[in-house]
Image: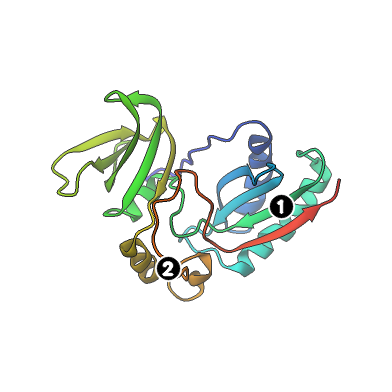
């Protein structure tokens, strides 16, 4: 299965992604996504994970220590900002083909770059990945499904449910609980681009 990442970053986030991805890979981590978040858009969130989906608070701190000096030298973000190195959390973004295969049977939301069947947004049950396409069941009985080209997905994420929390705990046990699978709140239908529930390391860059 290819290791291609859905890299939809633009502007500052795209510049940061190009800088930090090789550093993360040298540490044994994989980049999930880069975003400028927060009310004022002054928090630089770099989301990463190990290949097995685990990202502990110690991992976040290790990645942060390696990334910070590079960002200080290259200075891709003007002015002051918070640097947050984060795990994907439970209702995680789906950015690689293997993500869609690993979480088969769970609810997911997908947004396409171009309309498919007259719409851009889909919600359904992940049924797998094959030959460059994600198969999504569109009703509870999975009697109707749609195949969505991976290359045309703008954004995808899991939907937080009791079943997902339980499955995350079984798949990501032990140290992996620090990646957000120890979250104990009630499941909710969050906004499509809702905030991460995982652990993170945050630092402030002065102006």
Q: Position of residue 126 (x, y in %)?
A: 28, 48
Which residue in the protein does label 2 denote? 172
Q: Position of residue 123 (x, y in %)?
A: 31, 42
Identify whether 44 is placed above or below 176.
above
Identify whether 142 is placed above or below 14.
below
Identify whether 11 is placed above or below 140.
above
Element at label 1: strand
Indicate the quadrant containing the C terminus: top left, top right, bottom left or bottom right.
top right
Left/right placement of residue 34 relative to residue 99 reads: right
Q: Which mark is residue 62?
A: none
Left/right placement of residue 57 relative to residue 96 reads: right
Give the residue at x 76% y 39%.
77
User: Of circles 2 and 1, which is in front?
Assistant: 1
* Mark 2–mark 1 distance (CA, rounded to whole Å): 26 Å
Which residue in the protein does label 1 denote? 83
Identify whether 175 is placed above or below 134.
below
Q: Residue furthest right?
A: 207
Q: Please state the total of marks drawn on the protein image.
A: 2
How many C-alpha atoms fall within 10 Å of the one at disc 1: few (<14), some, or many (≥20)? many
Q: How is the image coloured?
A: rainbow
Give the residue at x 39% y 70%.
169
Element at label 2: loop
Q: Quadrant of residue 167?
A: bottom left
Q: Position of residue 81 (x, y in %)?
A: 76, 47
Q: Which is more toward the observer, 146 or 161?
A: 161
Left/right placement of residue 165 relative to residue 194 reads: left
Q: Which is more toward the observer, 43 or 148?
A: 43
Give the residue at x 33% y 64%.
162
């Amino acid at each position: 299965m290819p290791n291609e990442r859905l890299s939809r970053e633009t502007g500052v986030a795209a510049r940061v992604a190009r800088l930090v991805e090789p550093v993360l890979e040298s540490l044994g981590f994989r980049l999930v996504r880069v975003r400028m978040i927060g009310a004022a858009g002054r928090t630089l969130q770099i989301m990463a994970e190990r290949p097995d989906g685990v990202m502990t608070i110690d991992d976040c701190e290790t990645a942060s220590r390696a990334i910070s000096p590079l960002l200080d030298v290259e200075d891709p973000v003007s002015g002051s900002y918070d640097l947050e190195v984060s795990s994907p959390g439970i209702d995680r973004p789906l950015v690689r083909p293997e993500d869609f295969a690993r979480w088969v049977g769970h609810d997911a939301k997908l947004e396409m770059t171009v309309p498919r069947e007259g719409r851009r947004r889909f919600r359904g049950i992940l049924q797998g990945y094959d030959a460059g396409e994600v198969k999504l069941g569109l009703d509870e009985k999975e009697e109707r499904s749609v195949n969505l080209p991976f290359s045309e997905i703008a954004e995808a994420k899991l939907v937080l449910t009791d079943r997902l929390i339980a499955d995350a705990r079984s798949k990501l046990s032990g140290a992996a609980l620090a990646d957000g699978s120890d979250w104990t709140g009630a499941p909710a239908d969050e906004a499509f681009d809702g905030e991460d529930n995982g652990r993170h390391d945050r630092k402030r860059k002065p102006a």
